[in-house]
Image: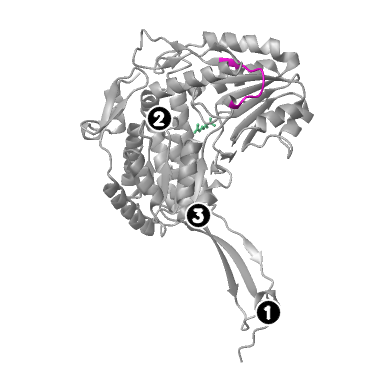
Amino acid sequence: MMNTQEIYDALGLTDADVKGGDLKVYSPTDGSEIAAVKTDSVEETKSKIAQSVTAFKAWRKVPAPRRGELVRILGNILREKKEALGALVTLECGKIYQEGLGEVQEMIDICDYAVGQSRMLHGLTIVSERPLHKMREIWQPLGPVGIISAFNFPVAVWSWNAALALVCGNSTIWKSSEKSPVTALACQKLFELACAEFGDDAPKGLSQTLTGDRDIGEALVASESVALISATGSSAMGRIVGANVAKRFGKSILELGGNNAITVSKHADLDLAFQGIVFGTVGTCGQRCTTTRRLFVHDDVYDALIPRIKKAFAGVSIGNPLDEGTLMGPLIDEDSFNNMQKALELAKSNGGVVTGGGRAIQEEYPNAYYVNAALVEMKGEVNNVKTETFAPILYVFKYTDLDDAIFRQNDVPQGLSSAIFTTNILEAEIFTSEVGSDCGIANVNIGTSGAEIGGAFGGEKETGGGRESGSDAWRGYMRRMTSTVNYSTELPLAQGIKFDTE
Ligand code: UN1
């Protein structure tokens, strides 16, 4: 495994990038300082936005398939740097190396997808009600796109947005999480390498990063020059960002909190369900927006499944995420640990029976926050399960009737991901029907997390309604233009209106 300096060298990060700055970055793996990066002021933010406007005006004129070529080069560079960037993701955000690599693979996948899309920014032709007229729908570049990302997917979420935004003819400005600025600087280096290989038609400032705190994000959100804000984070953050963008009639894509549930039917393949539940809960130490947070288990299989999950949670290998064999790395920081403990206390006071959930390997890592995953057996429906705690806590409920389980699954403010394990086709179809799950993602015999990039990713209700990544999410980064052309010598009005000017 590369050490920190080797990772920086491989990604082109120099001392000027990672030393002497005002924002200190600590690795959640052991609490050590790994960088001190320079932050942007609000003034610098404004000048980067101005640069982004200039870049957009040039980039929108470059043919889309040529724009795709830049993203193709970026994808190739990511292939070369996969190990180094994956290791940096692990070092800075604490997910295990396998997941760090997976995150970079997700970047490569979306680059490939966007390259194809760059030749498929199709519009419609529409018949006109008027003689010798035709209508078209044309998709135009939108403008500078502001990307606000969270620490838990510090690079993939940027790439979902940037790869599509770029092929659609936009410039981008990325405000990374103040907890994970180094991975963002590394991506910027790789992007600059791609531009150098691509040639002069990639304008200066086509993709830029912003490092810093909330005030920088606010300046980005407030700027009328930024056509679209794509923000990933908590529902509390999204409520402010969404409203502030709407106030200036900007566009937004919001990817906010999840409160994802798995339902395990009496017809389930319990081995599959078991694997899906354990990965969904402990993966990324419970810090995915798609993490499995609630479990509805049919009465008949409860006793066969729950002890097995408890045993797996107790036995999962917790340790430095850079070590092979570790399945569960640390929480991001002390606040996160405290929030987890508060949620468990609240669950207990509501009658929940908690197994696990305490701090782990503290002697070895006194300045890092490793935990055991918690399983909480709930007696009734209580409000403590209606908020998202970004930690590995699985709240477990029993059910007898599927409609009731679906009702309870949906009875939370969030609507990101959901899953049912069943081999009964009727149950599977009901779950994915109009009276089934109300979430943006509804899986059958697959857990709640680990979506592929080919589908549209996002959710309903307090999850924000945004869709990113595959399917037709590219349209969110473009301006829809309806154009009617008259090739006659008359000027008939729509709806047959008579308006005689003679
Ligand atoms: C997130 O946690 O913000 O589906 C995104 C998944 C990943 C993406 C998670 N592909 O779990």
The quadrant of the image that shows the C terminus is bottom right
Instruction: Name the residue at 49% across, 39% down.
Output: 110
Tag in front: 3 or 2: 3
| Amino acid residing under circle 3 | Met
- For the residue pair 288 and 240, the one nearer the viewer reads as 240
How far across and down, in percent of the image, does residue 247 sit? Answer: 47, 54
- For the residue pair 132 and 473, the one nearer the viewer reads as 473
Label 3 residue SS: strand
Mark 1 = which residue? 497
How far across and down, in percent of the image, does residue 85 sit? Answer: 37, 29
How far across and down, in percent of the image, does residue 285 sit? Answer: 48, 21
Is tag 1's residue or tag 3's residue first in the polypeptide sequence?
A: 3
Query: Which mark is drawn over residue 478?
Result: 3
Look at the numbered disc 2 and say if its residue's Cβ is closer than 8 Å to ligand 1: no
Circles 3 and 2 in contact, beta carbons < 8 Å = no
Reply above or below: 377 against 240: above
Reply above or below: 437 against 27: below
Instruction: Name the residue at 52% across, 15% down.
Output: 373
How far across and down, in percent of the image, does residue 148 sit? Answer: 42, 41
Label 2 residue SS: helix
Circles 1 and 3 in contact, beta carbons < 8 Å = no
Is tag 3's residue or tag 2's residue first in the polypeptide sequence?
A: 2
The quadrant of the image that shows the N terminus is top left
Local crowd at mark 2 within 10 Å, few (<14), some, or many (≥20)? many
Magenta residue check for 76: no
Label 1 residue SS: loop
| Amino acid residing under circle 1 | Ile
Magenta residue check for 379: yes
Give the magenta-colored segment's residue range. 375-383
Mark 2 = which residue? 82
